Image (cartoon, rainbow, N blue to C red):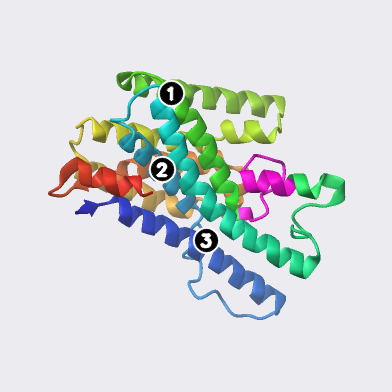
Amino acid sequence: MKIEGIQGLRALAAYLVLFFHVTGNERLQISLARASEKPLFGTLFNQGFVGVDLFFVISGFIMAYVTHDLTRGFGGVKQFMLARLFRIYPVWWLFAGILAILSLAMAGTLWHPDAVNAAEGNGYLFMLKSFLLVPQDNLPSLNVGWTLIHEMGFYLVFAGLLFLPRKLLPAGLAVWAVVVMAGFVLASQLSLTDATLEVFLSPMSLEFILGAFAGFAFASGIRKFQLPAFIVGLIGAVIAYPLVSASMAEGDRLIVVAYFALPFTLIDRPRCGAEGKSALQRCCASG
């Protein structure tokens, strides 16, 4: 089985995020020690948080691709959601559970003292929502799980689109994109701060949607200009990389999406090896 592109992009996204956090922790420890050292990689991974945006594009591509031949209707939706639930929750529960045990041993509560306090609500409800990946005002107990909350939101909406006939999936994706953009603008104008709305109207949904468009096109046999698209996307991503900052990841994610959604989608165009579609589908289904 020869899969070009998807696995390499996954690795790139993972390393960008990993070294972004490593560099941030280095800076924190240097500051606490009042030392003058510099992080090992300097400023190279200051924008490594964009690996999350690349992950979301890849996720959209994979979901559209592996469901292309799925039976439409309740049976197909059930199959899709069960596969996603068993893919996400067991690993999440393992690591979130380990953190809960450590927190109990060190702080006497299942949650870290900085995660939630009595004034913000019930800690046990906070933990239940964290374990179920339900949106809430606080980050989940294991805070990197915020990306999984968005993933589950993507899956729920995408599952609804699987009730449509296959040929209408692009139209459904387009409507989803319009709803996200209009809802995001409206919520911003009205200063709505509901946690669930923030997930479902997040501009990062557009990355999943664009990836899904690419996955549908690829599964439908539309595979022209892959190399030129990859080159244009790579150039665009390289140009955009130094233009964003970590502060945008928290407050101006729309700008990050505007810079990277299209370049990452153009990059996310794998090529099949000798075993063709079935090989790629089996590989993607594992992710």
Q: Which residue corresponds to mark 3?
A: 46
The residue lying at 31 percent from left, 56 percent from top is: 8
Q: Position of residue 73 (x, y in %)?
A: 40, 21
Name the front one of labels 3 and 2: 2
Instruction: State the CA–CA distance, disc 1 to disc 3.
Output: 44 Å
Q: Earlier in the sequence, mark 3 or mark 2?
A: 3
Q: Position of residue 3 (x, y in %)?
A: 23, 52
The residue lying at 54 percent from left, 74 percent from top is: 39
User: Is there CB contact under 8 Å for labels 3 and 2?
Assistant: no
What is the span of residues highlighted in magenta in the rendered image? 126-143
Tag 3 secondary structure? loop
The quadrant in which the N terminus is found is: bottom left
Q: Earlier in the sequence, mark 2 or mark 1?
A: 2
Determine which of the numbered discs, if any, sits on residue 49 in the image: none
Q: Is residue 142 magenta?
A: yes
Q: Which residue corresponds to mark 1?
A: 74
Residue 143 versus residue 109: which sits nearer the camera?
A: 109
Amino acid at the residue labelled 3: Asn
- 238 horizontally vs 143: left or right: left
Quadrant assignment, res 109: bottom right
Q: Is residue 165 above or below residue 275?
A: above
- 109 horizontally vs 236: left or right: right
Instruction: State the CA–CA distance, disc 3 to disc 2.
Output: 23 Å
Q: Earlier in the sequence, mark 1 or mark 3?
A: 3
Q: Position of residue 146 (x, y in %)?
A: 59, 47
Q: Is residue 151 above or below residue 106?
A: above
The residue lying at 71 percent from left, 29 percent from top is: 192
Tag 2 secondary structure? helix
